[in-house]
Amino acid sequence: MPIIALIVILLIHFRGEDDLHKFQQNSYRMKRYLKWRFGDYSRILRPHELLFFLGLCLASFIDTPWLKVIGLVMMLVDTYFFWLIKTAYPIKKALVYTVRVKRLKATKTLLLAALAVTCFYFPTLLFIIGLTYFVSFIYTFIAAIINKPLEHYISERYYKDAQNELSKAPHLNVLGITGSYGKTSTKNVINTVLSKDFNVLMTPESFNTKMGLTRTLREGLKPIHQVFIAEMGAKEVGDIKELCDFVHPTMGIITSIGPQHLESFKTLENVIQTKGELFQAIPSGGTLFLNCDDENIMKLPVREDVTIYRYAVGEKAKSPEAHKLNVFIKSLKLGSRGAAFTLCYKTEKNGTGSVDLTTKLLGRHNLSNIVAACAVALHLGVEPSRLPVLVASIEPVEHRLSHRLVADKYTLLDDAFNSNPVGSKMALEVLSHYEGKKKIIITPGMIELGDQADALNHAFGVAMAKVCDVVILVGPKLTLPIQAGLKEENYPEENCHIVKSIHEAYTLLNDLVDQGDVVLIENDLPDAFNEALL
Amino acid sequence: MIQLGIFFGGTSVEHEVSVITAQQAIAQLKKLPGYNVVPIYISKDNHWYTGDYLHEVEHFKSLPTVIEKSQRVSMIKTDKGACLIKNPLATRGQNIISAIDMAFPMIHGTGGEDGNLQGFLEHMQIPYVGCNVLAASMTMDKIASKLFLQSAGVRVVDGDWFYTHDWMTYPGAILDDLEKKLGYPMIVKPADIGSSVGIKTAKNRKALMEAIDFAKQFTTRVLVEKMLDDMREINISVLGDCEKLQLSVCEEPLTDSDILTYEDKYMSEGGSKGMSASKRQIPADLSEPLLKEIREMATVAFTALECSGVIRIDFMIDNYTGKPYINEFNTVPGSLAFYLWEATGLSFLDMLSEAIEAGYRTFRRKNGILRSNHLNLLSKKDLKGLKK
């Protein structure tokens, strides 16, 4: 019966909404999306969907009308279950109906409509079409393929617009920032430090792709801008070069090179080479800012034809002469409310000198960001005596080791945005500085570390055991390496709790937390990784 | 290229002065790299015009021709700033004449120096050179600025003020009051008009009455001040903003009559050369302590009012006591006081550059603070968890 076919197609359409959502969360990359889908069998088929299958068989093969109706009802009930499960867990980030999503949806609807028409003429196809319910993501996939040329045309147009905006700003200095981690926090700090004395535009949030840069330039760049801070992200070799050819940075800074995004890069050598693309792209007479604390950065070939600023805050800062440092620190005091230190500089532009600075930011890695920002400021002509006021105005970015008091009860250390091995180490160091009550950590561990994931998460578990009084791990499967690390340190099992989702974690926290405790939220993953949601 | 809109002309009595100021400045700004000058002429009947015809000062000998040969425009707000569109809109073809990324008002007097234009530019959300709405409107009004400066601890002469409608009802009472409070000689000024228009001195009651009657043509509020009958005029210019400022050398305008009149300022042989042509002594001959005091007073007044750009402060030195008093603030000084800066060692172009930088700083400071609330007080969702 055609009405059954129509309803089945409507059910497919309904299930497809979820597919669009997951496609968006996988950055519209088809290979990535497919990999994610097949990463866990539960993302394709669930036990309760047997009901749908049975209903489909009934509706397709049995000719008795009332049995057909029962089959239809079974399918409807099963879809209802699907919807129930999905909405039982609050979604962290819902599907955003961008114009691109609307285009995809339109194509998909047309596809399904064509399918409905086909079903009308060839009712025997009902079973086969019903089977595609289980792989409804293929419709999203096909729609994506169909839309690809149009999307390409649109992004080329936007790209040309962005280049046009670049040409309209006569005094623009472009600073490219890349690094395995610390890009966004360094960028934010540099932006704050420069914004008082220059007209600065920076790529917002974590917009570090070609599309992100395009959008920032189109929507934000004005002719009066004097500095453009372009965060450059990379997942594959050649990504950074592409971005440099786009915005032509004259200044470059690499914050760190480490094992990040190893799934797409495969080897650390590739990571080093890609980040190095920024160094190659700076023209003669340009400027490079080198983080000398990072071993891998020191491996990059040094260029003679650019101005180099070497900065460091770690061990190397103790012997500045030996490492030819231009900007480094002395007399550091780290606390639970921030830090105070002396910034020393030795540059052609400013000579030799020092200035005392204080900051509200927590964590040793933030020191590196601040020193980098000061180096950039000094290079652009800011007087050293102005740095204290600029640095004091830096506010912690939400979810990047920011802190606040919750309900007058406990201190929350919010490091929810993207964790990496160094970042999590720093966060634990900050946590260890808090005196008093219980130290609680909530984390799902770190992702996108390729084949080093287990080792690094294990080490994280070991470090956690030494600092935290209570550990809440999110995702029983995902956090196995951490659990192993904790076990190695003989961490008391009653202090370690394992939950399925972040919401469960918060509920548990409310029961456990007392007045004066400190809670560290380390990394928070998007819905696509939520083990409770499938 | 940064499109820099230069506003000049205006509806005040200093319309022609503004044309000259602007032409002098535009000639310099054309040399500034990265900027494209867009002249915006405001006619006496308050319409805006732009076009290439505005680039020659000679063309302004006939104002109707200027209007005829220029394009009438309006300014609208765009995503990234502002732009000029044709007024009235054309039914065919391009309506956008030019983007305006930054504005530089050079209008003297009411309509341009009093905050009206500045308020408009604030709405356009583009950076502009010069004082903001508060400083501009406050300094335009002689009564408000006197009261403000007194509170800020800056020395100004004693004065009193009244409405013209009260004058017309109780002239006798007002005269008695003034004689008791201030004593002759006095000087009568309309509260809110520039360039010495409507100002008269009075050495006796009859002269005072005449002076007030004369002044009331130009205003609804009249200010009467104690006149320093033996005094020197000293002017100084301040450049920058409340974070970073510089002071120029002082000048002493030389004149035959007791005060510089409109005629003195603009209709002497210098003709169309504006303020730079009248006779003056630069740098003024002042003792060290007096110079220091003048500079301090100028800085305090400038920062108290949160001024920006290039302004000129006019002082009066009482020859009996040797004390300096602030007489007047000019937030858009004639010829932008370039002659004072040249005498200080800063070229006209560099001075304009500094004024533009000050404009950016003001804009950045304003954008760096939280002014609006993301919460929608009418939305239940936004308020969840905040209200009990």
Image (tube, helix red, strand yellow):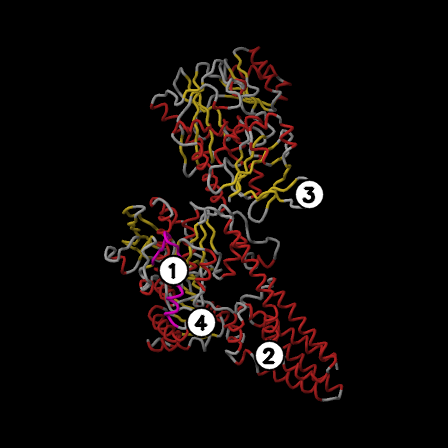
What residue did someone put label 1 on?
A: A280
* Amino acid carrying mark 2 in the image: Val
The question of residue A94 being in magenta is answered with no
Say whether mark 3 and mark 2 are on the same chain: no
Residue A264, numbered label: 4
Q: Which residues are magenta?
A: A267-290
Say whether mark 3 and mark 4 are on the same chain: no
Nearer to us of marks 4 and 1 is 1
Say whether mark 1 and mark 2 are on the same chain: yes
Coordinates of residue A168 in the picture (x, y in percent): 51, 48
Of A173 and B212, the residue lying toward us: A173
- Give the mark nearest the N terminus, 2 or 4: 2
3D distance between C-alphas at marks 4 and 3: 55 Å
Q: Which quadrant would residue B16 be assigned to in this image?
A: top right
- Give the mark nearest the N terminus, 4 or 1: 4
* Chain ID of residue with mark 2: A
